[in-house]
Every structure is written in C-alpha cells, then in structure tokens.
Amino acid sequence: MTSVGPTVVAARADGRAALIGYLPAGFPTVEGSIALMQALVDGGVDVVEVGLPYSDPVIDGPTIQAAAETALAAGSRTTDVFHVVEATAARVPTLVMTYWNPVQRYGVERFAADLAAAGGAGLITPDLIPDEAGDWVTAADRHDLDKVFLVAPSSRSERLRLAAEHCRGFVYATAVMGVTGARDETSSAAPGLVRRLREVTDLPVGVGLGVSSGAQAAEVASYADAVIVGSALVRTVLDAAGLDEAVESVTKLTRELAGGARGELRGPAQS
Amino acid sequence: MTHPMPDATGHFGRFGGRFMPEALIAPLDELEDCWRTAMADDAFTGEFRRLLSEYGGLPSLLYDASRFSEVVGARVLLKREDLNHTGAHKIRNVLGQALLTQRMGKKRVIAETGAGQHGVAAATACAYFGLECVVYMGEVDTERQALNVARMKMLGAEVVPVASGSRTLKDAINEALRDWVANVDSTHYLLGTAAGAHPFPAMVRDFTRGIGDEARAQSLELLGRLPDGALACVGGGSNAIGLFAAFVDDPDVRLFGFEAGGDGFETGRHAATISAGEVGVLHGTRSFLLQDEDGQTVESHSISAGLDYPGVGPEHAWLADTGRASYRPITDAQAMDAMVVLAKTEGIIPAIESAHALAGAYDVATELGPDATLVVCLSGRGDKDMVTAATWFDLVDLSDVVEDVVEDAVGDLS
C-alpha cells in the first residue's frame, strides 16, 4: 500500500510543497466525481483527498456542505467512495476524508479492509481525536493505512504531541480556528502552529483551511510540507455550467495551485 | 451521593466521549476545568442555589395528583417543573452554564434551539447576566415557532435561522458548533441538553439533578420512603437524567424514560432513539442514533418539538444498556390524550413533552400495581403548545388568528 508520506517528503526534496486536492465522492454524481478527481491529477496534485459526503459536517463551511448535500441527494453511498478511490489510486496516492459515523456504521475493520483493497492510502478524520481512535488505529495498522489526525491553533503542545504520535503520512494542521472555506487572507496562526509542531515531530506537516489561490498556496508552501485545498475546488465545480466546464476549471485552478506549491507564484510576504 | 459516571475521559461505558474537531478540545478542556473547580467552590454552588431559589422559583413542588392518580391506577406525584421561571426545568441548566460563562470571563453565549424552549431559557439567563446571546434555530422551526422567536428577541437575543441540511434542530446544533470553533475565546456554547461532547452530558446532568434531589427528599418527607418508580420524557434527556441521577443508586426505585413514538414505532416516523436507533456518533458523543445504513443521520418526527431529536444523551444509552432504566416509545396520540386527561382532572396543562411521561405512567401503573407510587417529572407547562393542542383536538379554528398575531409580534420586534 502507498503511504502519502514518501510523496510529500519527495516533493520537499524537490524544493517544493506537495499539493493535496479535495473533492467529495459522488459530487455531482459518482461518474462526475471520478472525472473531476482525474482533473485534479491532470492539473498536478500530488495527493488526492476524496471526501465522504455526510449529513452533519460540522467542520465544513457552506461550500462543502452544499456539495455534500448534492452528493447525498443524488444517492451517493459509502461504497461509492471506494470506486472513486480506485479510479485515482493507480495514479497518485489517494486519501479519504471522512467524519467518523459513516466509518463506525460501515464497520471500522471492514472499512479499512475495503479502503486498502481499493488502493486507498488512508484516512483523514476531522472529528476523530486520537483519544477515541483505538479501533481505527488497530485497523489502520493491520491494513497498512495512513492515519491523518488534525491539530489546530488552539492545540496545546501535549495535544500536538499526541496527534503526531498517532499520525502516519503527515500531520494535518488547520490554519484557522473555523470551518472550511476560501478566505481572502491567509492565516496568521498557521506558521506558528507549524513551528510548534516541528518541535514535537519530524513528520511532514500539511496545512489546510482557507487556501484558494496560487499565491496563497505559495505562501503556505514557504513553511509547510503540503498545501491542502478543498473549498476553492468545490466552488469552481458549483459555479460551472456543466461537468465539462467543471473539469476544465478544476484542471485550471489545480495548475495554478500546483504552481504556487512550487513557489512560482509567491504572494506578498506576510508578517 | 456522588454519581460514579462518567469515567475520567467522559465515557459512560461504551457511550459518550469526545467526537469533536481537535480545535474544540482545548475549549472543552477549559470548560471541564472551570466546571469541576466551580462545583468544588462553595461560593459558586451557593450562588447557583441562591439564583435557583430567588430567580428560578425553586425548589419546585412535589404535588400529589390524586384525581389523575385514580385514572392512572397508581399514586402519581408530579414534580412541578412547569412552575419554574420560564415554565420548564431548563432554567436550572441555563443558570448553571451562564454562571460558568461568567466565571470563564466570556461575554458571549451561543445556543441551539428546536421549538425555542431552550433558546428562550438561554436568552433569559443571558438577559439576567448581561451576556450577548445568539440562538441558532432551524429555518423550518423559526416558521413553526414564530412566537418563541419573538420571545427571544424581546429578551435581547439574536436569532439566526439555519438554512442548511434539514433546517431543524440537528442543523442548528451543527451551525452553533461552527460558530463556536470560530469564536471560542469570547464565546461559551450553552448546550441545551445532556448530550454532546464531554463534559456536557455530565455537566448538564449535575445542573439539572436538583429535580431528582428535591423529589427524593420530598418523597421521603411525604411518604416516609422512596417512590417505586421515577418517570420522565426523553428527547436529549436533560429532565430525565436530572430526575434519575438522584435515584440511580436506589435499586428499589425503577427508572422509566419515555421517548417520542411519533406516528407509531412501526411507521418509522418517530424520535424513539433508544428503542429504535443504533449505536453511532453525532454532535460529539457516541450514543444511540437514528441513522440509515450508511450512518447518515435520519430525521426524527414528533408532535413534541422538544423531543424531536435523532440522538439521545450518552448516559441514557448507558442506563438502557445496563438495564438500570427502561425506555419506551409513546405515540403522539397517547401523549395528547394524557395531556387532556391531566388538564381535566387536575387543572394543569402540561407541555406535550411532559405528557409523554404522563402517558407512560398508565402502563407502569399496571405493571407495578395500584399500591405503587410514581414520581413523574412534569418538565414544562403547556402554554406554548396550545396551537398544536387546539388543532389536534379541533377545539377552535385558531390558525388564522394566531398567525396574524404572531406575524405582528415578530414584525414589531425585528
């Protein structure tokens, strides 16, 4: 199985940050989401992050909520996630981002087995803290899967250490205290959070929440190992007139973001 | 007597815990520290008692409902939480949490509300303490419960209609959590029931356990012994856990929770989470949950907005699991019948929520026999439910009149 860790480390060795692009499975349809995931890869993401649509996404802002509602209304099922993962996992390492209840309901061990069989790299778990993750850690280790837990600007150092001890692949640093969604300004809290993380772990650090442009990606790339973009990509799909236009605009935005992650579009330095 | 649950990490057996974004762990830790220190501080507990007494009108009466008892077939003692300030048990929880908000030095409170009862209670406590108050309420509910929107506005709260998801209580909670994560430094999330992430289930229980502590002492005084059963309705479960907490270590007192059976258990249109749900995670806690086979939350249905929630507090899940308490569904029709029986036998109009517990007393009386004494928590008064009741019983064609009144009231306040 492919961990995303070496991919992120290799990007860093190239003198750039890895780009991780998020879109939900089944949005706008299962087939449509597979085409859009391929567009992410064509546009230059290093890692694909497939979202599992959920009825109560408490850490997501209106954009990703709307996408999840669209996917669920179109009949998206848990098993569809594995089909979507299969479609991209041969090209780039592919993670699933999911709230915990769908996994618990599916069966933690069964989910891990099916994700591994589909070629998935592991899970990002936004509402599962390591303290509650015993079943998942066991299943992930059994199936050689990445475990990506989140840390936040509010996390004290013992929480950073706990998360880092339980992560494999990278540590996901949420750049702001808030929900997902594009923001005009980049986070002032993120560089400090990444610095505090570096004091407790050698794992790569990915930064997400609020990154929407090449310039913002470049700024995050200056201090993090991976740049994670979700809402901005979802927004381009919501704004597109049809699937073809969505594929085109996702590819275009991904190219811009990938350029940023390579440091080509460095924005004005922030203090 | 100290309640042994939850454990140090907030678990009631396999239930409870913290299923929350990491960003909220620090504020939950801060809240837990503040609450534990406060509860060990005589100045805090003394102030809480003083507020409950001078402002809340507590302790509430334990009333020997003799005419209702004749109908039920056992002696029924009603714990009259309907007489509290704001008309329900919820004043206990909001005063406790508002005091904690002050102690944490926070100036802003957010709350969720379904029908508006907790929203009104939270707005009341915030007005009393001079705290800013923002209440999240599903858009569907702001339309159904416009009069409570007017109440909250009159009390100085801002009411934010939530248009995401199913636009009801569960989505109002989602939106409140999104607000909280963005504003934790200034803001306390005043959750309205004994659910959510640790420490909320234990904290809300301890703020509402006066219901049971008072009822226990009042029973001993009135009867010279403990009651045979303690009965309460269960939505999220705050009035029930407040009652049960005092009796959980008394093995001879049977505990009964009554969930909203809606149109009937077999129709699938209900809110009987423990009776029909499966283990899952929602809003920060592991408990029983109405969910589909993919773990997506399923909408609940009940004539009683206060019971219309697809989850339930984790301690109830644990009490059900261990067999210490029994949980049963009561249909809309059973609850409405009990509502009118209490009104006509005792001159007390109960909240439809509380009527579920009254309806449950019939079967419990049959099981325990005519010599049994049952404490039933009359958790709230029924004034708020008169439009629903008038429509259900076809008492008078109120709908047009009431809509006009409500529109005027809301218009004037906005």
Image (cartoon, coloured by chain):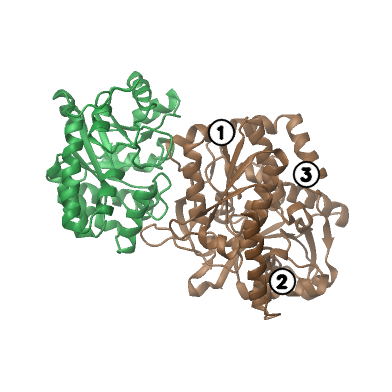
Observer-nearest residue: A210 or B246? Answer: A210
Q: CA distance from mark 2 to mark 1?
A: 42 Å
Q: Earlier in the sequence, mark 2 or mark 1?
A: 1
| Mark 1, secondary structure of its residue | loop
Q: Chain of mark 3?
A: B
The residue positioned 32% from the left and 21% from the top of the image is A198
What residue sits 50% from the left and 36% below the top?
B183
Toward which corner of the image does residue B222 lie, by quadrant?
Answer: bottom right
- Residue denoted by label 2: B339
Q: Quadrant of the N terminus of chain B?
A: top right
Q: Earlier in the sequence, mark 3 or mark 2?
A: 3
Q: Colour of chain A?
A: green
Placement of the C terminus of chain B among the 4 image quadrants: bottom right
- Chain B appears in which tint? brown
Indicate which disc residue B186 carries. 1
Kindly state the secondary structure of the residue where label 3 is placed: helix
Asked if residue A241 lies left or right of residue B52, the reply is left
Question: How many residues crowd mark 2 within 10 Å: few (<14), some (14–19), many (20+)?
Answer: many
Is B329 above or below relative to B197?
A: below
Q: Secondary structure at mark 2?
A: helix
Left or right side of B22 for B193 = right
Q: Chain of mark 2?
A: B
- Residue at the location (69% across, 34% down)? B39
Label 1 vs 3, first from the N-terminus? 3
Quarter of the image for residue B253 reads: bottom right
Amino acid on which disc 2 is placed: Met
Measured in 3D between alpha carbons, the distance from the residue under mark 1 to the one under mark 3, in whole angstroms, is 26 Å
Which residue is identified by label 3? B52
